[in-house]
Image (cartoon, helix red, strand yellow):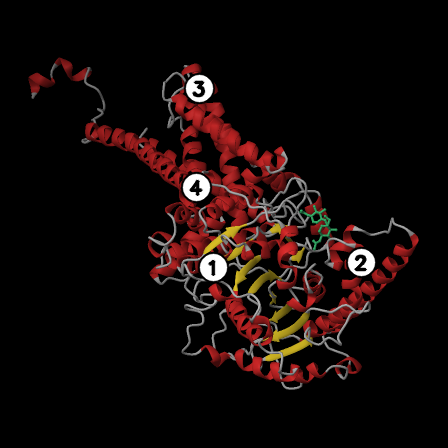
Amino acid sequence: MGKEGGGDEDAAPLFETKEGRFRGAYKVFASTVFVAGRYWAWIGMFMAELCFGLYWIVTQSVRLNPVSHHPFKQRLSYRYEDKLPGVDIFVCTADPKIEPPTLVISTVLSAMAYNYPPEKLSIYLSDDGGSQLTFYALLEAASFSKHWIPFCKKFMLEPRSPAAYFARHSTVTHDIAYSQEWLAIKKLYEEMKNRIDSVVEIGKIPKEVRDHHKGFLEWNSKVTKQDHQSIVQIIIDGRDKAVVDIDGGRLPTLVYMAREKRPQWPHHFKAGAENALIRVSSEISNAPLILNLDCDMYANDSDTVREAVCFFMDERKGHEIGFLSFPQNFDNITKNDIYGCSCSVVNKFELAGVGGYGAALYCGTACFHRRESLCGKVYSKDYRAEWETEATKNTDKTSNELEEASKVLANCSYEKDTQWGKKMGLIYGCSVEDIVTGLAIQCRGWKSLYYNPDRKAFLGIAPTTLDVVLVQFKRWSEGMFQTFVTKYCPFIYGHGKIKLGAQMGYCVYLLWAPVSLPTLYYVIVPPLCLLHGISLFPEVTSLWFLPFAYVFLARNACSIAEALSCGDTLEAWWNSQRIWLIRRTTSYFFALIDTISRQLGLSETTFVITAKVVTEDVSRRYEQEDIEFGSSSIMSTIVATLAMLNLFTLLGGITMIAMAIDRLKALEQLILQLILALLLVMVNIPVYQALFIRHDKGRIPSSVMFKSIVLASLACLMPFIFTHGCIF
Ligand SMILES: *[C@@H]1O[C@H](CO)[C@@H](O)[C@H](O)[C@H]1NC(C)=O
Ligand SMILES: *[C@@H]1O[C@H](CO)[C@@H](O)[C@H](O)[C@H]1NC(C)=O
């Protein structure tokens, strides 16, 4: 020791540094994680692209095959005016608080005033609320119709929903004779509306009104929404030639029905109501054609029934048609359609495309059915409809006898051990019973057509807040995806029965929910990779850049062209991109999660929408096209978080490129991600406004704002730990 220690002793360091034992190994590990981070991002990207690609192929089936139909109603009246078939019109309502009776009767009146022989029309109102308020409103409507229908017919008024008509024409501009009558009718209408509104407000019927009609006796026993006997009241018996309007014209039959409800019996929601209506109407008028309408969906064209009959009576192809569906259009769409409710591209191209395969979708409303096909008949080549014999079935029974006989048909126990809900009528047990029922009819061999007239046939009311839109879409997309994973999957159930194009057409909608995943990936991962300088797309100088740029430009150009050709504004197209993004990242995503949880038997998320009265405030913002967030639901949190994430990544990405040593190179590598992030930020501008600028009640609440900032910042840091976590 002595020697060694000798002269060097002074120079020896006072401490030494040793390399960590596994430093080399760790470097290898770190770089694999780094590469793997990239690698997984790439794999994910590849999968997302693959999903989009597959979904895109599915959607192409409908794009390739749109057809449009044009009925000739003059030829119909020329050939068949006195042989026109009867038509039963079903209007369904569920709750007088959510669906105000004045709205419901406007729909009923618009249907009663169709330009069609009144003795061949019957209107049935199904009231699942079992409410005497609705019944009362219908009585009022019946007496008002005696003025309204002849007035409409005399002056050829359109539309024939009094609410819509007077909203659109608030003053008269015609000659004196007409204007006097006009003012008188308007006054009658307003008085009726006030009477109904005040009865609804106090919530009970005044005694003198109750004594006026025997129908109110039904409410003498205890009637609640969930628990009551069947109620069927024929308010106008159209067979009776003595019942006439003020000009002596015949009136259509008008029936009120509240099917029996008992807590111990499942009621199957709207499908149950419609099946009861099918049976009750078969007892009373038994028309061979049935039109379904939602209670807020008034008839905007008084010739629609005639046009529909053209299809069914056509000598060459009419006998094949099981149903004829119309698009759902809305009255209350603002110019640039902030919630994308008008769906004009879907209506004009997609649904028409599925219809082109003879398999138009039944969407639960605005649809004419052939009674036989709806009730389970299987199509055969020799089938020919007999239009005339049917309507005369029950001429010998009195109104009272018909009512008593129909009540039995609306009883809970009636369907026990029958095919109702299985092979007959609307199918039970799925939340999109309408889609499934339509598919089942097509699989029984019937064709269905889609008819989208230029002048819209039916107009409903569009939702005016984001929450309502999103929850609606969540419900639909969930029901659709559930259908996809059951035996009703069109590829299985429809195999060999409907065309492949039609099967794919159905899947455009049934696969809404799973498309949320690649979309979420696209709005989260590429921007985050941008933030961390990880390039996912080809560089500008690479040849692979071209197909990317081409696909991007071509798809958007095509989408813009489609929207403009439907009469949308450019801004409406831009808005539709936003709402499309929001829907996919929230509604569809939760629908997917809930479908999976249900399959696994776990509990589901619930979104309860408090039936918000649309206040004047909300209406005003809707008219100004400000998106109504206004609640701190998880949906708005997601929307805000994604928007913040995109903002952070864009700013971070720009900073990073600006500080890079070789700026040009960095830009070349990241340009596509930069553009993507920029577009996402631009499309989200209204979200930032709702977060930081707006002060009205429709803005995003500050609790959501804080949450979204925290969540977005965490997300920005997370992959940093993952991929760069090893840079010590
Ligand atoms: C529909 O919109 C019109 C104006 O665009 C408005 O006057 C009306 O109150 C709205 N109706 C409903 C039910 O929101
Ligand atoms: C509804 O009908 C009226 C005619 O009464 C027509 O002017 C209007 O364009 C129709 N609405 C739609 C959306 O087609």
Under mark 3, the amino acid is Leu
Q: Earlier in the sequence, mark 1 or mark 4?
A: 4
Circle 4 packing at 10 Å, graded few (<14), some (14-19), many (20+), is many
User: Marks 4 and 2, Cα distance to the nearest angstrom?
Assistant: 47 Å
Q: Is residue 708 left or right of residue 108?
A: left
Q: Is residue 148 above or below residue 725?
A: below
User: Marks 1 and 3, Cα distance to the nearest angstrom?
Assistant: 48 Å
User: In front of the other: label 2 or label 3?
Assistant: 2
What residue is pinned by disc 3? 667
Q: Earlier in the sequence, mark 1 or mark 3?
A: 1
Task: Describe the element under mark 1 as helix, strand or loop.
Answer: loop
Under mark 4, the amino acid is Thr
Which is nearer the eye, 426 or 387? 387
Task: Describe the element under mark 2 as helix, strand or loop.
Answer: helix
Which is nearer the eye, 145 or 308? 308
Q: Is residue 418 above or below residue 222?
A: above
Check residue 154 in the rendering and tell me which mark sits there, or answer none.
2
Task: Describe the element under mark 4 as helix, strand or loop.
Answer: helix
What residue is pinned by disc 4? 59
Under mark 2, the amino acid is Lys
What residue is pinned by disc 1? 432
Q: Earlier in the sequence, mark 2 or mark 3?
A: 2
Quarter placement of the C terminus: top left
x and y percentages locating residue 380 in the rendered image: 40, 61
